[in-house]
């Protein structure tokens, strides 16, 4: 599965003359471009986890660690008034305030990530794809987003479960597909399927395809709730154990009979 977002993104020519961008190092500028072109969804929101940003921006560079990327991310947030950090359901996200003004998105896909605070969505200052503004907004405003509904909280739980199962290795494409799965199966079902996938693969990281296969199988089998799937799995495990025990007993009897010339 490709990690890159299947979108066309634009970088304005004034990006290179932006005074905020001028404060960044070469690698920080590359990270910022990756945030704009690859990480951000159609609403200008992206996950801020350093491991995710490292993979998306520096996937081919072994010498750049997650710690390095976190330092770069924090410096970008300190210098660029367009990039704002916020927290929702104990997860960090970044909002690019003027993202929509410079991106021509024909068919916009609704964001699967929690919305930033309302004050973040005002006209931006400078940085990247932005024009000069007289605002004196601080570079970084760190705050928590109140849960607007049970759905937002449940969705956050799903993404936390997926990040945990994947050891933090989550892509923007994962976020989009998992959001679609939540819409189709509900957050409760997807969370249960993630747990199922994680326990089934054990030493391997679960994949989106495997997660989808579990949900489709549960749907075909007509389960009404996740606990039905759990009960069915436990039933199958018990039946498998009983079958294996019967096979072992049969082989023991066959060996005993052969040793005693019976049969």
Image (spheres, helix red, strand yellow):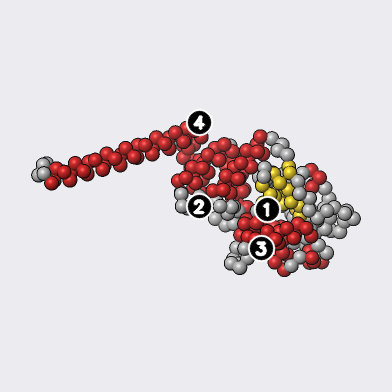
N-term-proximal mark, 4 vs 3? 3
Question: Which disc is residue 48 wearing?
Answer: 1
How far apart in space, not on screen, are marks 2 and 4 (Cα)?
A: 27 Å
Question: Which disc is residue 68 wearing?
Answer: 3
How far apart in space, not on screen, are marks 2 and 3 (Cα)?
A: 24 Å
How far apart in space, not on screen, are marks 1 and 4 (Cα)?
A: 36 Å
**Residue reaching furthest to the right:** 134
Quadrant hosting residue 159: top right
* Percent of width and height locating residue 257: 14, 43
Residue at (59, 57) in percent of width and height: 3
Question: Which disc is residue 205 wearing?
Answer: 2
Q: Is residue 13 visible?
A: no
Q: How many marks?
A: 4
* SS assignment at label 1: loop
* SS assignment at label 4: loop
N-term-proximal mark, 1 vs 2? 1
How far apart in space, not on screen, are marks 4 and 3 (Cα)?
A: 46 Å
* SS assignment at label 3: helix
* Percent of width and height locating residue 172: 63, 52
Tag 4–tag 3 contact (CB < 8 Å): no
N-term-proximal mark, 2 vs 3? 3
The foreground one among 175 and 242 is 242
N-term-proximal mark, 2 vs 4? 2
How far apart in space, not on screen, are marks 1 and 2 (Cα)?
A: 21 Å
Question: Which disc is residue 224 wearing?
Answer: 4
N-term-proximal mark, 1 vs 4? 1
Quadrant hosting residue 185: top right
Tag 2–tag 3 contact (CB < 8 Å): no
| In the image, residue 23 above or below residue 144 | below
Residue at (65, 38) in percent of width and height: 153
């Amino acid at each position: 599965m490709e990690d890159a977002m299947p979108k066309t993104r634009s970088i304005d020519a004034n990006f290179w003359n932006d005074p905020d961008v001028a404060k960044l190092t070469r690698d920080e500028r590359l990270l910022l471009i990756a945030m704009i072109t690859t990480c951000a969804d159609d609403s200008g929101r992206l996950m801020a986890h350093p491991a995710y940003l490292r993979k998306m921006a520096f996937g081919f560079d072994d010498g750049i660690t997650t710690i390095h990327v976190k330092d770069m991310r924090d410096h970008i947030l300190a210098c660029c008034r367009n990039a704002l950090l916020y927290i929702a359901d104990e997860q960090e996200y970044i909002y690019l305030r003027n993202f929509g003004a410079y991106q021509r998105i024909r068919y916009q896909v609704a964001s699967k990530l929690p919305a930033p605070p309302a004050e973040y969505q005002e006209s931006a200052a400078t940085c990247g794809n932005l024009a000069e503004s007289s605002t004196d907004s601080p570079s970084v405003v760190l705050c928590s987003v109140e849960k607007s509904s049970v759905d937002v909280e449940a969705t956050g739980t799903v993404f936390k479960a997926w990040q945990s199962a994947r050891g933090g290795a989550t892509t923007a494409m994962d976020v989009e597909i998992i959001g679609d799965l939540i819409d189709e199966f509900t957050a409760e079902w997807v969370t249960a399927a993630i747990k199922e996938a994680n326990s089934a693969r054990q030493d391997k990281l679960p994949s989106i395809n495997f997660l989808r296969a579990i949900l489709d199988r549960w749907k075909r089998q007509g389960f009404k709730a996740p606990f039905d799937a759990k009960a069915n799995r436990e039933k199958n495990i018990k039946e498998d154990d009983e079958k294996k025990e019967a096979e072992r007993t049969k082989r023991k009897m066959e060996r005993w009979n052969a040793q005693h010339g019976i049969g």
